[in-house]
Amino acid sequence: MTNHRIIEQLDKLIEISITLSKEKPQKELLEMILRGAKSMTNADGGTLYLIESN
């Protein structure tokens, strides 16, 4: 992995962390987390599972 790629990944983590500290709609946060995880892992897709209590 190149230094440039590592820096890009760290920048993405910082961006996600800043966003998580702000109040945003849950759907927007989950989409951002998923996009960030896909980008960092070079994945074509991903799934988030939400657990809700009854």
Image (cartoon, helix red, strand yellow):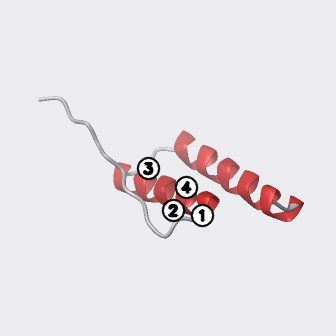
In the rendered structure, find residue 24 and report the number of the disc placed on it: 3
Label 1 with label 2: CB-CB less than 8 Å = yes
Residue type pointed to by label 1: Ser
Q: Quadrant of the N terminus?
A: bottom right
Residue located farthest toward the bottom when viewing the structure as drawn? 44
**Whole-Å distance between the Cαs marked 2 and 3?**
16 Å
Label 2 with label 4: CB-CB less than 8 Å = yes
| Vertical side of 42 occupied by 53: above or below | above
**Whole-Å distance between the Cαs marked 4 and 1?**
5 Å
Residue type pointed to by label 4: Ala
Q: Position of residue 48 (x, y in %)?
A: 36, 50
Q: Earlier in the sequence, mark 3 or mark 1?
A: 3
In the rendered structure, find residue 39 and report the number of the disc placed on it: 1
Label 4 with label 1: CB-CB less than 8 Å = yes
Label 3 with label 1: CB-CB less than 8 Å = no
**Whole-Å distance between the Cαs marked 2 and 4?**
6 Å
Element at label 2: helix
Residue type pointed to by label 2: Arg
For the residues carrying marks 4 and 3, which lies nearer the camera in this image?
A: 4
In the rendered structure, find residue 37 and report the number of the disc placed on it: 4
Residue 23 relative to residue 52: left or right: right
Q: Earlier in the sequence, mark 4 or mark 3?
A: 3
Q: Position of residue 45 (x, y in %)?
A: 44, 66
Q: Residues within 10 Å of mark 3 (few under 14, many from 20)?
A: few
Label 2 with label 3: CB-CB less than 8 Å = no
Q: Position of residue 34 (x, y in %)?
A: 47, 57
Q: Earlier in the sequence, mark 2 or mark 3?
A: 3
Element at label 1: helix
In the rendered structure, find residue 13 and report the number of the disc placed on it: none
Where is mark 2, residue-wise?
Answer: 35
Element at label 4: helix
For the residues carrying marks 3 and 1, which lies nearer the camera in this image?
A: 1
